[in-house]
Image (cartoon, rainbow, N blue to C red):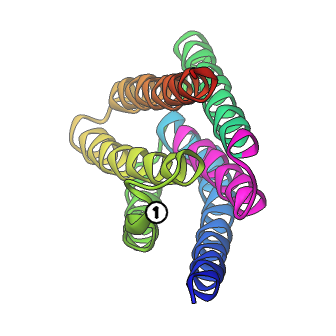
Amino acid sequence: MSCKCQQATTVTDKKVLFIALALNFIMFVVGLIAGIIAESTGLIADSLDMLADASAYALGLLAVGRGMRFKTTTAALSGSVLLILGIGVLFDVGRRVIWGSSPISTIIITIACLSLVVNGIVLYLLRRFRDGEIHLRATWIFTRADVVANLGVILSGSLIALTKTRYPDLVVGIAISLYVIKEALEILGETHKNNRENKSP
């Protein structure tokens, strides 16, 4: 009986992760194209965050049913990818500060609202993982970060429309990057803690 329950949970976990993976990859493509067209650091940062999420969900799918060492390793890899992307967006913000940009508020707000709806759905689907195993908890943390990022991008688009300047986009781009880096460090911290607990007698 317990085997059947465990098998059912594994199948459900995989289905949830696959749906989350598909939605995030689609929004990564949409967000990146829109960010390039709108010259928005915020949207580009948000789209890369979606790509990081999609990677986390893919790794989560691979980890379902595997040993704890594999799960910890996939969580650490996810956190590392997120950290690299967060730092990369900071460099992009610096580039735009130097060379300039003209963000388009209507595109920013529209895509950010769409992303918020998608992430809200994914966060609801992943609520079962909030207190779960480390590789699954990492997916929930990623999505939680996305929701905050979406709200920040919507705010920046609104401020751009009101002030007619590019600075809100740059500020939000920095803020999202720092938040993404914080979430990455949180995941890496949990994997380190998990490794120490597994090594202790």
Q: How many marks?
A: 1
x, y percentage for residue 124? 37, 71
Q: Main secondary structure of the magenta part?
A: helix
Position of the C terminus, as image quadrant, is top right
Q: Which residues are magenta?
A: 45-70
Under circle 1, the secondary element is helix
Q: Nearer the viewer, residue 115 or 100?
A: 115
Residue 135 in sight from this viewpoint: yes
Q: Position of residue 163 (x, y in %)?
A: 23, 34
Q: Say which amino acid is labelled 1.
A: Ser
Which image quadrant for residue 98? top right
Drawn side of residue 101 relative to residue 128, left or right: right
Q: Is residue 2 left or right of residue 42?
A: right
Please state which of residues 26 and 18 is positioned toward the viewer in this rendering: 18
**Residue 57 magenta-highlighted:** yes
Q: Residue furthest front?
A: 201
Tell me the quarter of the image containing the N terminus: bottom right
Q: Residue tagged by mark 1?
A: 115
Q: Nearer the viewer, residue 47 or 83?
A: 83
Q: Nearer the viewer, residue 12 or 199?
A: 199
> Could you tell me which residue is drawn at 67 percent across and 73 percent down?
18
- 43 up-or-down from 63: above or below: above
| Relative vertical location of residue 124 with respect to residue 53 in this rendering, above or below | below
Q: Note whether residue 123 is visible.
A: no
Q: Residues within 10 Å of mark 1 (few under 14, many from 20)?
A: many
Residue 87 figure quarter:
top right
- Picture quadrant of residue 120: bottom left
Name which residue lies at 67% across and 24% down.
84
Q: Is residue 122 magenta?
A: no
Q: Picture coordinates of residue 115 (x, y %)?
A: 46, 63
> What percent of the width, then of the height, locates residue 77?
72, 34
